[in-house]
Amino acid sequence: MAAESENTAAGNIDLAPTKPPIWNDPVYRGIFFQVVVVAAVIGFGIYITNNTIENMAARGISSGFGFLETTAGFGILMSLVDWNEEMTYGWAFVVSILNTLLVSFIGIIFATILGFIIGVARLSANWLISRMAMVYIEIFRNIPLLLQIFFWYFAVLRALPQPRDSVSVMGDFFLNNRGVYVPRPIPEAGFDLVWISFFVGIAATIAISRWARKRQEATGQQFPTIWAGLALIIGLPIAVSAIMGFPLSFESPELKGFNFKGGLNLIPELVSLVLALSIYTASFIAEIVRAGIQAVSHGQTEAARSLGLRNSWTLRLVVIPQALRVIIPPLTSQYLNLTKNSSLAAAIAYPDLVLVFAGTVLMQTGQAVEVIAMTMAVYLTISLVISMFMNWYNKRIALVER
């Protein structure tokens, strides 16, 4: 008792908290429940897969992906790569993916440009421009996308004249109910150098942009990056092409019989789908842009003007860079929506993934599980790639604490 009293008096009592038992430890408990959830999901997936395979076997339905090597035997209205009826279902899968990627890529580009213009116009001090932007937004975002696709396809493009009465522009561009016919560029010997100069121009523009940003942060001096980029990306290939004697010819479309032959044909299904997707999605992007710009403190604008910056510089150098941090996350959702909405192309017979692979191929082969699973996997992959890229860009432009 005397020694204990002495230790207490000396402050040597162990006051460290005792470690809880493993079943009551929050860390181990959290890991346990996560393992249970993952195991349950995997087990459910295995059960569904085995059950599906057994049911298909019981009904005499063949399974597997061997059908991809079977000859397709049907035509596809539009293809970015070589295609004929003798090719396989596997190649039809590739053709349909490329068509889906094409309409999604063009739609995203046009919707972004149009959406930013309408969004900025929505905040214009000009009463007429602001109201016109508002009317555009309220009209196109409140009409179902499928109806807009039908409008552009049936009411606009299908109502155009027959090929013999085509609307001609400069004698080489023709517009009729079969689509838009434009001259087809045909590269000749030496054109590879033009392509190389084009990609060199892009790489040089990126390098100059980074250098100009660091220079501005260090000295405050601006560099005309846009004009330099245009000179490199457009001017350099033109200069190389001139040196090589312009190794590019054009094949103009000609009316032969009941339709045009030669040239490049943009089918009405593609044009109407791009128009509908772009205009519809741009109405949502415009509101996202407007909200992003309004989220920037008005003091930033006043500070920029007090420094003598013009309105265009204030918008481009001060407001937009800060607004992008608000704009990018919802903009990503619109890109994903546009890509998935492209599956409505089947309504007007545009040969996308849903129409060609999940439609024609499924009907001919009866491989419903495999075809639908592959179709879903493609859309999931495209969406994940878009999300990864936009998340990377969003992280890149995020504010960095110093």
Image: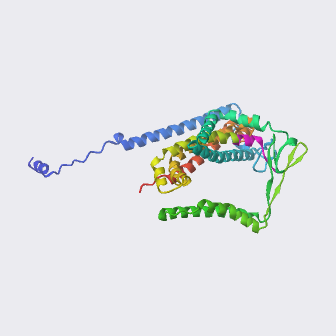
Q: Can residue 242 be seen in this view?
A: yes
Q: Does 267 lie within the magenta span?
A: yes
Instruction: Determine whether 200 is above or below 399 in the image.
Output: below
Residue 364: x and y, percent? 76, 37
Q: How many marks?
A: 0
Q: Where is residue 66 in the image (x, y as percent from the top left)?
A: 72, 43
Q: At x 57% / y 61%, what residue is drawn? A: 209
Q: Which residue is drawn at 61% across and 62% down?
A: 205
In the image, residue 186 lies in the stretch drawn in magenta: no
Q: Report the side of 353 relative to 46 (left or right).
A: right
Q: Position of residue 244 (x, y in %)?
A: 77, 68
The residue lying at 86 percent from left, 41 percent from top is: 165
Where is residue 243, by image quadrant?
bottom right
Report the magenta residues as a range.
263-274
Residue 297 seen: no
Image location (x, y in percent) of residue 337: 61, 40
Q: Is residue 307 above or below residue 368?
A: below
In this view, 209 is above or below 32? below
Quarter of the C terminus within the rendering: bottom left
Q: Residue furthest left?
A: 2
User: Which quadrant of the structure image shows residue 290?
Assistant: top right
- Say which residue appears at 66% left-offset and 35% top-offset: 145
- What coloring was used for the rendering? rainbow
Pick the residue in front: 230 or 15: 230
Viewer-closest of 161 and 75: 161
Left or right: 85 as drawn, with respect to 196? right
Looking at the image, which is closer to me, 323 or 202? 323
Which residue is farthest top?
59
Residue lying furthest bottom: 243
